[in-house]
Image: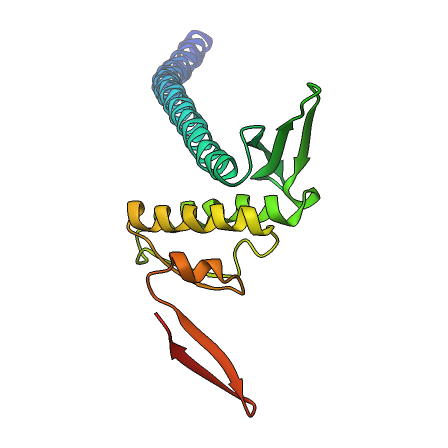
Amino acid sequence: MEKIDDLKRRAQSVRDAYMILSERQRAAGEKVEKLEAEMAGIAKEMHTRSEAISFIEDVAANERVAVKERVERLVTDCLHEVYDDSYSVEFDYGMRGGKTAVEISMVRKCDDGLVVKRQIDGIGGGVSDMMAFPLKLVVLLNDGEYDSVLITDEPGKHLDTTRVRKFAEFVRTVSHELGVQIIMSSHWDIMKDVADTVHEVSLDDSVSRVKRVK
């Protein structure tokens, strides 16, 4: 009889242990289900975020292409005004040091059909001047923190006499039509003819003197 009672106690102990294990397993199962649901939510959220990031990147890329084309046209128009229609400008985007970088190139179609493409640091001073001036305007006009005043040192100094006249007229047109005040220093007399205001700087006994002449 004592053995039977002992077996009953052992059986009850086993049942109790089973019930405890079953309860723990049930609780663990609920936790697993909860974690799986949370992971599914996180995965869905990550997918949504990934789609949102991809969308933003696509919009940014499209906007960059549009800006790129507008700036290329502006610089190209400047070259056409001063040189001729055989010149154009191209921007090539890439990555450098983990950051977006841009290479600016001058493209020229020669009379024999040959197309020459050179980066801005490998072209003549005159063409380089004509590419740099409108780029300065782009930076100025897209920065709302500053007034529309461009200060530049001897723009077009590498141009010949014929082309510098065209450039001077282009500068005047840009200033008036875009509402940009352009303050420059120059050794070209033609700049006096197109400027609204002219000051001459002279050296008198090691002292710089400024005199308004127009």
- Residue under the point 64% across and 49% down: 125
The picture places residue 60, in percent across and down from the top left corner, at: 41, 29
Looking at the rendered image, the quarter that the C terminus falls into is bottom left
Q: Is residue 197 left or right of residue 77?
A: left
Q: Work out whether residue 79 or residue 1 is closer to the camera in this orientation and state it.
A: 79
> Up-down: is 11 above or below 125?
above
The picture places residue 191, in percent across and down from the top left corner, at: 45, 59
Q: Work out whether residue 71 or residue 102 is closer to the camera in this orientation and state it.
A: 71
Q: Quadrant of residue 52?
A: top left
Furthest-bottom residue in this view: 205
- Residue under the point 38% across and 25% down: 59
Q: Is residue 7 left or right of residue 33?
A: right
Looking at the rendered image, the quarter that the N terminus falls into is top left
> Up-down: is 70 above or below 43?
below
Q: Is residue 98 left or right of residue 152?
A: right
- Residue under the point 47% across and 9% down: 3
Q: Work out whether residue 186 or residue 135 is closer to the camera in this orientation and state it.
A: 186
> Up-down: is 51 above or below 63?
above
Which colour scheme appears in the figure?
rainbow
Q: Is residue 142 visible in this depiction of the protein? A: no
The picture places residue 156, in percent across and down from the top left corner, at: 54, 53
Q: Work out whether residue 136 or residue 166 is closer to the camera in this orientation and state it.
A: 166
Q: Is residue 178 visible in this depiction of the protein? A: yes
- Residue under the point 71% across and 20% down: 112
Q: Quadrant of residue 16?
A: top left
